[in-house]
Amino acid sequence: MDRATDGRKVHQTSQQPFFNHGGDLSRSLSPAVEELRILIEKDALIHSLFTDMFSEIPRQPFFDMDPGGHPQIRNYKTLLCYLDHVIVRAPDFDTTIMKGFPINAVLAFPMATPSGIAAFLNQKVNAQIKNILNTWATFLSSPGSRYVLDADPDKGWLGAKALALMPNFAVDYVCNPAEPYFGFHSWDDFFTRKLRKGARPVDCPNDSTVILNPCESAPYRLAFGVQAHDQFWMKDQSYSLADMLADDALSASFYGGTVYQAYLDSTNYHRWHSPVSGTIRKAYGKPGAYYAQARSVGFDECTPNSSQAYLTHVATRAMIFIDADDTNIGLLCFMPVGITECSSCEVRVSAGQRVEKGDEIGMFHYGG
């Protein structure tokens, strides 16, 4: 049976069979997952990290189930089988703290161990994870991924439980409830759905002193007088501007400045809009980690939520520098930060481009 066709099966097949076995690798894996297997088994350091990250998870009742509600995976071979399973399926809706993030759910505890922290900062590992996530993103952009866009009351993204978390869905978003899948062409089309005109009016459009929140996000932290260098990996996760901005030539312009950070949920709107009117100075993506967590956090059921300040320094992200028309604001940088499965940062503006406050400038996608 074709792998993509198999992915169109009903919800109940989506996650079940891969948790209580030792990882049977006798069958062939998809090319992306096979490349990760080869890396693990041919690189002595990475092999030790992927072996130890599972043995370092405590054998206590709290750790018997992962935060997604499944038996905790206990070895890398089972993980590989699970990844191979996930990347030809769309994520079901659920009511757990990991809704929409099935890989994050099984890695929540392994990535918090000393070996897991080291493994998921490794550049070679992240190159393979990027390949896996992008393979999955290709499927999620196909019509075969739409089967989760239905009214199943428990697992459908257009069911009663899901829509309760996205109130006024048909009023706010460009869709057609009379069509199958509300007219969405793929899971990605749903995830990156557009707002209807007037659904999110720009506040104070003619007041240049007002800076907009560029995403439909909830406040996380506001910091003043941020240093060029700080110990971002420590418990308070202080911002370190040179590290956040990857030593960009413009970094020094922000030393001693202000950082406002906010976060999105899987049910939120995932496009970005310009916070000010002005001109794009530069815009680009910065490769980084996908499943990183601050060592100081420890085991956290909703990881990496408690590591969000830390992630601004190490995660895959983008940087959009804007020269604001208002000289009292001057140069600012909008930095969308990828997180686990949702790490593709599509920048839709370029240097020299004029933007008005509220103009679309990019979006998040699943992938790497």
Image (cartoon, rainbow, N blue to C red):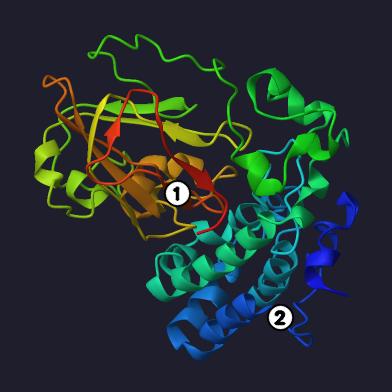
For residue 167, say whether it is visible. Answer: no
Disc marking residue 29? 2
- Packing grade of label 1 (10 A; few <14, some 14-19, many >=20) is some
Tell me which residue sits at (84%, 58%) in the image.
8
Secondary structure under the numbered disc 1 in the rendered image? strand
Q: Nearer the viewer, mark 2 or mark 1?
A: 1
Q: Quadrant of residue 78?
A: bottom right
- Disc 1 marks which residue? 346
Q: Amino acid at mark 2?
A: Leu
Q: Quadrant of residue 138?
A: bottom right
Nearer to us in this view, 142 or 248: 142
For residue 89, say whether it is visible. Answer: yes
Q: Amino acid at mark 1?
A: Glu
Q: Position of residue 77 (x, y in %)?
A: 68, 77
Tell me which residue sits at (61%, 67%) in the image.
135
Q: Is residue 320 above or below residue 4?
A: above
Q: Quadrant of the N terminus?
A: bottom right
